[in-house]
Image (spheres, rainbow, N blue to C red):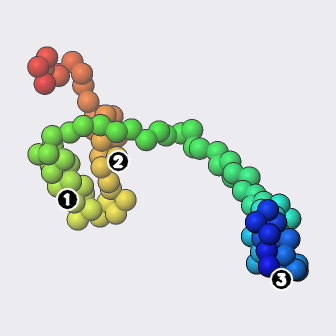
Amino acid sequence: MSRNRQQPLDSSPQADGDVLSGDDLMRRVFYDAPLPPRVTQPAPVVVERPTHYRVLSISLYTEDIERLDALVKALKERGHTKANRSSLIRFALDQVDIEKMPRGY
C-alpha cells in the first residue's frame, strides 16, 4: 500500500500496535507512565546542645600555640592524663590577676 502525503506515519497499518511508533511511544512514555514513588526525607533528629559550655574560636600567635602545646605535653608527662589546651587555659583564667596585666600586652 502506498502512503498518501497527507496521511500521518502512525496511521499506516504497519504502525498499528507498534510500540515503537513515534507518537504512541511519546504518549506512553510521557503521559501514561506512572510517576516514580516520592522519596521522603526522614524527619531531622533534634539534638539538644549542651548549655554548660560553648565552642569558641580564638587567634593566637604560632609561638604561643607551641608554648601552650609544650605545657600540655609537660602536664601529661607529670600524670595529668586529661590535660589539654582548654583545661590549661581554664586553669590560667582562674589564676590571672588583671591588676598585674600591662596595658600594651
78 with respect to 47 (left or right): left
Label 2 belongs to which residue? Answer: 87
Q: Amino acid at mark 1?
A: Ala
Which of the marked residues, 3 or 2, is nearer the chain's N terminus? 3
Q: Nearer the viewer, mark 3 or mark 2?
A: 3
Question: Horizontal and vertical percent for residue 49?
Answer: 59, 44
Q: Considering the numbered disc 1 on the image, is that residue within a helix, a strand or a loop?
A: helix
Which of the marked residues, 1 or 3, is nearer the chain's N terminus? 3
The answer to whether residue 83 is above or below residue 59 is below
Q: Identify the residue at horizontal 20%, vertical 39% (top origin).
A: 60
Q: Identify the residue at horizontal 29%, vertical 46% (top origin).
A: 88
Label 3 belongs to which residue? Answer: 1
Which of the marked residues, 1 or 2, is nearer the chain's N terminus? 1
Label 1 belongs to which residue? Answer: 74
Q: Identify the residue at horizontal 34%, vertical 63% (top origin).
A: 81
Q: Amino acid at mark 2?
A: Ser
Which quadrant is the C terminus positioned in? top left
